[in-house]
Image (spheres, grey):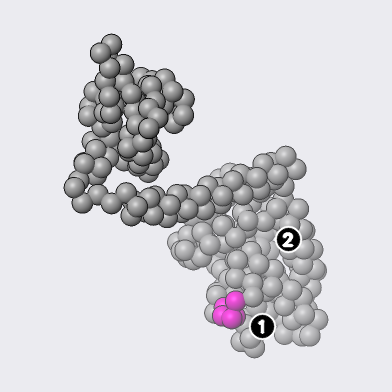
Amino acid sequence: MEQYSVKKLAALAGVSVRTLHLYDQIGLLKPSVRTEKNYRLYGQAELLRLQQILFYKELDLPLKEIADILDDPAFDPVKALENHKAALQQKHQRITTLLVTIDKTIDQLKNETMLQPEELYEGFPPETVESWQRLAVEKWGDAVERSRKHLLQKTKQEFKALQHAASLNWQKLFSMRHEDPANEQTQKEIAVHYELIREFWGTAGITDKQAAAYAGLGDLYIADERYTMIEGKPQPEFAQFMQQAMKFFAERL
């Protein structure tokens, strides 16, 4: 039966000679033969034991624990290999998922499509953003984080398109502030506003129509003038119009 020197086994297993010397010193992997000149030789049994050691190391077990497992009289090498296989398959799945994520991230960064958190509030003064976020968390709680995560999944182009649509809708509604909040034309534009808000909230398409939440947003427009300011100026008349139009719409959802 063929025997392997330390150097040959190290090359075969992809470990260093120093590692095999250490394993010998701590009793983890003893050579089958030690020659008169103190050369270490390893046989088939040692090759199989080394394979087990390397598998357990891949699972991040400490050497002392590996030794205890392999030296247990009840140790079953076939069962151990089956367990190694299952563990490595799980690890392979995790690595595959990570590689896909890395590829997506690289592609997004190369094409500058990834949306950054600060871009959600681009153009607003930092103190205003901080104030809005604090108020939103106090009023809406977990829904704020859900909305933030939903928006960060969008590409820059998707987010810019959503912002643009919201801006056009807001301008249109502002121009209609002297209209009857309940008339057909107003309610048609409010329906667009409602769908845009749901998209910002990350709840577009869910079965819960969120009528109370949408009406509550209208109340917030009245309570805090910052939400309906136009070019830095408070618009109480517009806030009143929005609150009434949104309440009328919500009552019919």
Q: Residue furthest top?
A: 37
Identity, as a three-letter code, of the amino acid under mark 2: Leu
Check whether the beta carbons of the residues at disc 2 and disc 1 lie within 8 A of each other: no
Is label 2 in a helix, a strand or a loop? helix
**Camera-side mark, 2 or 1:** 2
| Residue pictured at 64% horizontal, 75% vertical | 205
Does the magenta segment cover residue 24?
no
For residue 173, say whether it is visible: yes
Q: Residue furthest front?
A: 1
User: Between residues 186 and 4, which one lies in front from this camera angle?
Assistant: 4
Task: Please state the horizontal and vertical placement of residue 123, each as a whole percent of the image.
Answer: 68, 46
How many numbered callouts? 2
In the picture, measured across the screen, residue 69 lies left or right of residue 52, that is left
- First reached walking from the N terminus: tag 2 or tag 1: 2
Q: Which residue is mark 1?
A: 249
Magenta residues span 206-211
Q: Which residue is mark 2?
A: 162
